[in-house]
């Protein structure tokens, strides 16, 4: 008889669980199936680099088929489960529903952006969680510069040059810092915008940025942002977002056509459809071995799981990649033990460090109690991610991208129409993309706008 282990979700937790299961489970008596809705793992810590055009988007993902051995990869969307019947429900890419029967199930479904009922957020805010989010943000930025450049009246132009990030965790802080750096680079090619200047604001509900890192490092990060002209609003909430403004809880109104929402994460909605015990935050409750409470054959890891944190009694592990990948490896050992191979062990990892890469050779880091800042921290952060990226070819691609960006800068091509081919027979340039008609759309413009690092020609005549 062959045991069937099913993994739902192929991100940090799921991929590392599958790779370890391939090693620890006997080949002849087990098979592993990984269900994921895309055929790659997104390496999220490098997402800000992709948004800022330092890294080619394809280079911040790990193609699952190339990094899995005997695991059977099934592309599809998990829609529910029936743990009493040991069944996972999956919709194929074309929408056909089927059931996967398992002996052991590992849930690693990650998280989605945590939104709040802020008026206008759904209509005007952009997330920063997925690759499409990152590319949409970059395209929005470039479109805003393009549109601003065509506007005569500086007051009317101002909201196009206003950028607001909400949430100063590391996703928000790194995303804002990298994008602002990118914008400061390419604005050289937009004479009117350059003369008027941009406005970048980071809004945070808590008292300081980056509660995940020591206060002195957070203060350094805040100073670095300030030195770049980025305004910080701490202990402040967003009350309303419109097409061209953001109203804060202090009453201040910021002109901005770009609002990025990076205020935390929550489990994806499907987690509530699995028939499993959840904590107050909607994460799946597990014991120290990552076994779901009350279930002998279901395990949960990563952002969607409330695994007890060995470093903080009574608290779940924080939603980080470093926890998810280690939980993936350890849960594989425990699943093998449940099937009679080896011995189960609790999850004991304590955070070794945090890196916050702010671009421009600046970062802050805290590793094993040692605090780093400035260039050494930046170098450490890049080296760490390079070492962690699976596969030597992918490492080489990262080094190449970083080097090219360092030597030649970044270009401002807005390729929102990629993936939206022109309908056959339609007039040339009439893309089918949804963003084609949007004033600050993220998608299909009529033509890609290219502004390379050639001397600005003052086309706008200012
Ligand atoms: C911008 C950004 C920067 C970050 N930087 C860092 C950092 O520097 N360091 C760090 O430690 N952490 C960082 N994180 C956090 C880190 O990305 C997460 O903690 C980590 O990805 C969690 O791993 P996971 O396996 O739980 O989920 P994920 O890696 O998100 O994987 C979940 C997988 O499940 C798939 N999935 C979801 N729902 C379904 C479904 N219904 N059906 C099928 N498949 C589904 C998803 O497509 C995904 O492939 C960052 C996050 C962001 C957004």
Image (cartoon, grey):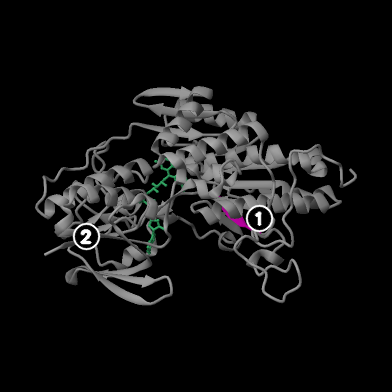
Give me the disc on residue 65.
none
The earlier-in-sequence mark between 1 and 2 is 2
Q: Is 234 in front, or is 82?
A: 82
Q: Is residue 239 magenta?
A: yes
Under 8 Å from ligand 1: the CB of mark 2? no
Give the quadrant of residue 239.
Answer: bottom right
Residue that numbered label 2 is attached to: 31
Tell me where residue 409 appears, x and y as whole percent: 66, 36
Give me the disc on residue 415.
1
* Marks 1 and 2 close (CB-CB < 8 Å): no
Q: Quadrant of the C terminus?
A: top right
Give the secondary structure at mark 1: loop
Q: Is residue 395 visible?
A: yes
State the residue at coordinates (52%, 53%). Answer: 131
Magenta stretch: helix, strand or loop mostly: strand
State the residue at coordinates (90%, 45%). Answer: 461
Which callout, 1 or 2, points to the residue nearer the camera? 2
State the residue at coordinates (17%, 49%). Answer: 334
Tell me where residue 372 appears, x and y as whole percent: 45, 23
Stretch in magenta: 238-242
- Residue 278 is left or right of residue 119, and the answer is left
Under 8 Å from ligand 1: the CB of mark 1? no
Tell me where residue 237 appears, x and y as whole percent: 54, 48
Q: Is residue 107 above or below residue 342?
A: below
């Amino acid at each position: 008889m062959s045991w069937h282990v099913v993994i739902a979700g192929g991100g940090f937790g799921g991929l590392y669980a599958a790779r370890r299961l391939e090693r620890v489970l006997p080949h002849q008596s087990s098979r592993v199936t990984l269900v994921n809705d895309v055929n790659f793992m997104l390496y999220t810590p490098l997402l800000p680099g992709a948004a800022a055009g330092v890294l080619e988007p394809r280079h911040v993902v790990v193609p699952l088929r190339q990094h899995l051995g005997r695991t059977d990869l099934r592309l599809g969307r998990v829609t529910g489960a029936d743990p009493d019947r040991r069944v996972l429900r999956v919709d194929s890419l074309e929408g056909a529903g089927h059931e996967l029967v398992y002996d052991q199930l590992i849930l690693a479904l990650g998280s989605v952006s945590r939104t709040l009922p802020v008026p206008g957020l759904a209509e005007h805010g952009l997330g920063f969680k997925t690759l499409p989010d990152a590319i949409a943000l970059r395209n929005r930025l470039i479109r805003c510069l393009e549109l601003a450049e065509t506007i005569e009246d500086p007051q009317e132009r101002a909201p196009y040059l206003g950028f607001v990030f909400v949430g100063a965790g590391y996703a928000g802080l790194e995303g804002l810092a990298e994008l602002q750096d990118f914008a400061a680079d390419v604005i050289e090619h937009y004479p009117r915008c350059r003369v008027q200047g941009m406005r970048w604001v980071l809004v945070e509900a808590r008292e300081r940025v980056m509660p995940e890192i020591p206060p002195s490092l957070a203060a350094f990060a805040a100073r670095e942002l300030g030195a770049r002209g980025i305004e910080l609003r701490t202990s402040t909430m967003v009350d309303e977002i419109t097409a061209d403004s953001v109203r804060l809880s202090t009453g201040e109104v910021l002109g901005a056509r770009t609002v990025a929402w990076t205020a935390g994460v929550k489990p994806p909605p499907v987690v509530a459809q699995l028939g499993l015990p959840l904590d107050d935050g909607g994460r799946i409750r597990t014991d120290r071995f990552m076994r779901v409470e009350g279930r002998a054959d279901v395990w949960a890891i990563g952002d969607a799981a409330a695994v007890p944190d060995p470093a903080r009694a009574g608290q779940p592990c924080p939603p980080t990649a470093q926890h998810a990948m280690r939980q993936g490896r350890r849960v594989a050992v425990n699943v093998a033990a449940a099937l009679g191979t080896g011995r189960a062990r609790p999850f004991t990892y304590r955070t070794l460090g945090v890196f916050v890469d702010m671009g421009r050779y600046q970062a802050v880091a805290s590793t094993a109690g040692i605090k780093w800042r400035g260039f050494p921290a930046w170098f450490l952060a890049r080296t760490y991610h390079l070492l962690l990226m699976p596969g030597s070819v992918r490492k080489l691609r990262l080094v190449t991208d970083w080097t090219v960006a360092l030597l030649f800068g970044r270009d401002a091509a807005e390729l929102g129409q990629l993936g939206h081919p022109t309908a056959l027979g339609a007039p040339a340039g009439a893309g089918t993309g949804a963003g084609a008609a949007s004033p600050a759309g993220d998608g299909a413009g009529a033509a890609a706008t290219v502004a390379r690092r050639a001397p600005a020609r003052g086309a706008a005549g200012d």
